[in-house]
Image (cartoon, grey):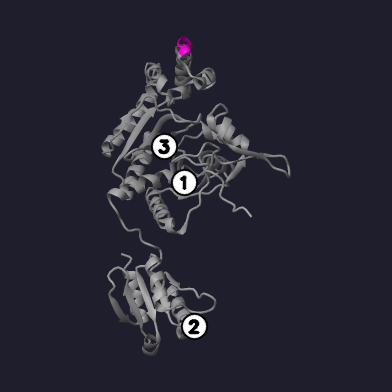
Amino acid sequence: MKTLQAVRGMNDLLPQDAVRWQWLEDTVREVFEQYGYRLMRTPIVEPTALFVRSIGEVTDIVEKEMYSFEDSMNGDKLTLRPEATAGLVRAAVEHNILYDGPKRVWTWGQMFRHERPQKGRYRQFHQFDVEAFGLAGPDVDAEQIVLLKRLWARLGFDNVKLLINSIGDAPARKAHRDALVAYFEANANQLDEDAKRRLYTNPLRTLDTKNPAMQALVSAAPKLSDFLGAEERAHFDGVRKLLDAAGVEYVVEPRLVRGFDYYNRTVFEWIAKGADWELTIAGGGRYDGLIAELGGKPTPACGFGLGVERVMMALEEQLKLKPRRFESKLDAYLVYGEAEREEAWRVAEKLRDAGVGVALHGCADGAVASFKSQMKKADLSGARFAIILGSDEVSSSTLTLKDLASAEQTRVSLVDAVQRLLGART
């Protein structure tokens, strides 16, 4: 019988890789909550119309990349979420969570896009997402950018770059769009097939083309900054002043537009660089019209998404330069003999009652493995210590605590073992 494999572009997370993922998750959560953002979760499956209305009907995601299907029970058109913002806004409107003022929220989980898998781009991927609802000033735009700078520092990243831009409000974008259409019409012979297809539906996306043959044409295209009004310029100036005050380096990139129709004013991207690659690891911006578009009261909003797989790639690159040890959640691995099996179980539960993370070696075919075999497993477990429980320890009501890094062994009481194990975490 043929062995079944995971769907292409949808990857397994194996135990040997989980410690780094858990460390990343814990670090991200700590930074988000340090800025006052609170956890919010939404379903993986949403009505297809939610993404058509929010992301935009004439976008690559809606046109080509969504996993959409019809519910066999009632015929509803449903979609596996390709991004998190739309679902969070839908939930905020549905549950009226903004009735008592602005909210800062975050979430994380799986997203799905049907595209060709490649390095840093998968069909199922994981994303952290931050949203602030009800705050109109430039402060929250800058806050989220500074938050990410702090996160990169906590993760130990050295080589990251920030791009920012203002894409203005709807009137400015319409005037810019009309100018773009006229410009691209006059140069229609230089457009590729994607640009021709989008000429009258979404010409702004052509500015983000990766086609080398179109770079000169795009560079000379009308710039959106020339169409911004005084209020839009003041907002962007406010963001920049706050970033300057926080010591955040950035590059104003006039061609930065992002891929979703709901953005307005501030947009930004953080880019990580490796030896032979460059990846956008986080990006977002302001979307003041989306809450009203999805049925809520007009409410300003700003947010970003952070790609976990891409951040992990950047982390791996950093580890080549600065190796580090990732601490396991496991404090100790308990090794015991056949005669001590029941006592080992009792000791393990007492340790867990005291807050210690401890694993016992399992029995193969009902027999306890040798001490040598168990110690090998202890070395591979990720635990800082091994706890040895033999006949001598049982008779003296003690435990032997072995530091697996230094090989130092100490005979201690259960109470002392707890204090040492918990103290080793700091």
- The front one of 82 and 240 is 82
Relative side of 227 to 409, left or right: right
Image-quadrant location for residue 310: top left
- The front one of 291 and 218 is 218
Image-quadrant location for residue 243: top left
Secondary element at image label 3: strand
Query: Which residue was labeled with disc 2?
Result: 342
Residue occupying the point 43% across, 37% down: 135
| Amino acid carrying mark 3 in the image | Gly
Secondary element at image label 1: strand
Q: In the drawing, what numbered circle is on residue 105?
A: 1
Relative side of 318 to 41, left or right: left
- The front one of 85 and 341 is 341
Q: In the rendered structure, which segment of residues is drawn in magenta?
A: 185-189
Does 244 appear above or below 308?
A: above
Residue occupying the point 35% across, 32% down: 163
Q: How far across and down, in percent of the image, does residue 34 sit?
A: 37, 51
Does 68 appear above or below 169?
A: below
| Amino acid carrying mark 1 in the image | Val
Secondary element at image label 2: helix
> Alpha carbon of mark 3 to alpha carbon of mark 1: how far?
16 Å
